[in-house]
Image (tube, rainbow, N blue to C red):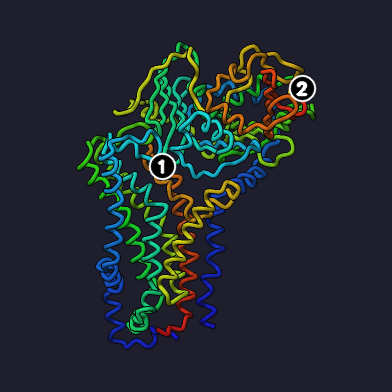
Amino acid sequence: MSPDEAAPAATRRSAALRPFALFGSELATLFLRRRTIAMLAALAVVPVLIAVVVRVTGAGSNGRGPAFLGSITDNGLFVGFTALVVCIPLFLPLTLGVVAGDTIAGEAALGTLRYLLVAPAGRARLLLAKYAGVAAFALAAPVVIVLAGMGIGALLFPVRPVTLLSGDTTDAAGLLARTALLACYVALSLLGLGAIGLFVSTLTTVPVGAMAATVVLAGASQILDQLPQLDWLHPWLFTHYWLGFGDLLRDPIVWDSYGQDALLQAAYLAVFGALAYARFATKDILS
Amino acid sequence: MTRLMRWLPALVAPAVAAGAMLGAGALPAYAGQASEARAAAWHTTTPSPSQVLALVAQARQAHYSGTLQQSSDLGLPQLPAATGGADAGSSQASGILEFLTASHKARVYVDGETRQRVQVLDSLAERDAVRDGASVWLWDSSKNQAVHVTLPSKGSARDFAPVGTPQDLAEQLVSKVGTDSTLTVSPGSQAGRSTWRVTLTPTSSQTLLRRAVLSVDQKTGVPLAAEIDARGQRSPAVSVQFTSIDFGTPAASNFAFTPPSGATVSQRSLTGRQPGNGPHAPGSLQGVTTIGSGWTSVIAASQGAAGTLGLTADQTRTLTALTRRVDGGRGLQTSLFSVLLANDGRVYAGAVPLSALESAAK
């Protein structure tokens, strides 16, 4: 059945006049939700925790621990980068998995999915709006981590021009540009996982199951990426370029991983987006 | 019917995605082979090996920048990369292991003979060697360490680089060519450029070395790839290749290096031990005798194994882990060379099977 055909002409016109109404309401619902706020707050706690621990113990890292940890005492701005390195393997996919897994299954579990589909939006557009919410969260999460990290770092440690991996230093404008690129890179890297989560979410009416499946897939992909015996598979894993954001901290910037990551994530988006559409458009909505 | 139509994108998307990824060079090997065949069809007059090697010698003044991919497959156990970039470089011993088992990506800037820069792009870390005239800076971001070396008059920053460029390997190749190997030239392509592939094949079948291939750019003579194949192994034992190259003059800012504030800066004189994470070449030992000749020759170092090699306790432990007990000592067998640490303290090494070293030791 197609909900489009059933829509009265008047409401169809209003949808045509305000094509982004659904996206707007979806974003508002997502970011005003207490769970989303709590997850972003939890992500912001990570850099605070790192900074406070380094400040209290006062010890350098002697080259051990996550990347950039040793630079924190010298320059507080590195707290943001260290926190990103810490968050990327687990916390970011975890929170994104919750958001993506909840998209369709959450509405189905609450019994609100059929009401959403009564509105003259069409299933494809609802799916797009849901995915836009996931993408917005994928961008918001790294931005929150980096900003919280740089803020707490600036409070607790001295702030200097940032030393890049290549040994050159960059000024405030350069740092701002690179940080913005970096947040976009992390957001881009999470798009594939978001599409997988969206697809899994159309398969079930139990949101917890979709969330868990998404997070488990992210973990499994990272484990496969660690095994050198499978190196032919690595360029195809959606987690493969997750830590490639280091290339943005070189001078001159290396764009290879940005391009490869974009291509890979676009491929995952195409495959799982199409799967999600096929499943959602042919599904009988019972709740 | 509409049901099927809705599944159609999901059926088409994987094929399109895979095609786009392959087409855009996510797996450059396939693309390389295709263009190689095309390049082979163009050329009819092939130069002699010595003409190609002369072309290489002329390329010393060339300027270019590009991305290098280095990989080794010596048949050593591979370790999971879980330790990450910061840990991998934490000790010299694991540095050697990392060099022998992992692959590296580096960016190279060359402006003539006196200005070079090699950036080894590790994950979330970087090692640099920057040379501008007589001044050479070595930078390791994971250790936050900069070393300044002043060259006397001759020398190249590449001697200190953790990854050798094709030029280095080309020069080593030229010096190795003798009556015990044959050289052939064939057209090929690398990084989108037409090349001459100089193939060196040892005449002896006793050596582990199957062949060495050097790809030289036809126009500029800059070596674009070097590959060493071991007997009985399909993937190259050692391979260094430009995946992309640009023959424009690199910006001068690439050769300027100022150590950042907060970094450990040290000066080093050239007479001291050379830094770098490369494995100790057997030829650099003291008191060396050579048994046999050509590719099957065995190098024997006379005095105390660990002492002569200058190994630390940490490195000795790694060595013990890598070697296995054989008749008369401990042996290390890789796909390309083997090393025998005899019980009497002598060290034998060569591009031959371990059994040949054992018989040489007797």
Q: Quadrant of the N terminus of chain A?
A: bottom left
Q: Residue placed at 28% from the left, 38% from the top?
A: A57
Q: Which residue is mark 2?
A: B180
Q: Residue placed at 50% from the left, 28% from the top?
A: B92
* B281 and B342: which is toward the camera: B342
Q: Which residue is mark 1?
A: A247
Query: Tags 2 and 1 in contact by the CB under 8 Å rule?
Result: no
Taking the image as shown, residue B170 lies to the left or right of residue B110, namely right
Report how far apart the C-alphas of labels 2 and 1 lie in the structure.
45 Å
Up the image or down, B201 lies above or below A153; here it is: above
Q: Amino acid at mark 1?
A: Asp
Up the image or down, B41 lies above or below B153; here it is: below
Q: Quadrant of the C terminus of chain A?
A: bottom left
Q: Position of residue B87 (x, y in %)?
A: 45, 37
Q: Residue placed at 73% from the left, 29% from the top?
A: B326
Taking the image as shown, residue A281 lies to the left or right of residue B41, namely left
Query: For the residue labelled by badge 2, is the local secondary structure a helix, a strand or a loop?
Result: loop
Q: Quadrant of residue A195?
A: bottom left
Q: Position of residue B12 (x, y in %)?
A: 55, 68
Q: Position of residue B35 (x, y in %)?
A: 62, 45
Disc 1 is attached to a residue of which chain?
A
Using the rendered image of the protein, determine whether residue A9 is visible from the camera's viewpoint: yes
Query: For the residue labelled by badge 1, is the local secondary structure a helix, a strand or a loop?
Result: helix
Q: Are marks 2 and 1 on the same chain?
A: no
Q: Position of residue A101 (x, y in %)?
A: 41, 68
Q: Residues within 10 Å of mark 2 (few under 14, many from 20)?
A: some
Q: Quadrant of residue A32?
A: bottom left
Using the rendered image of the protein, determine whether residue A174 is visible from the camera's viewpoint: no
Taking the image as shown, residue B183 lies to the left or right of residue B27, namely right
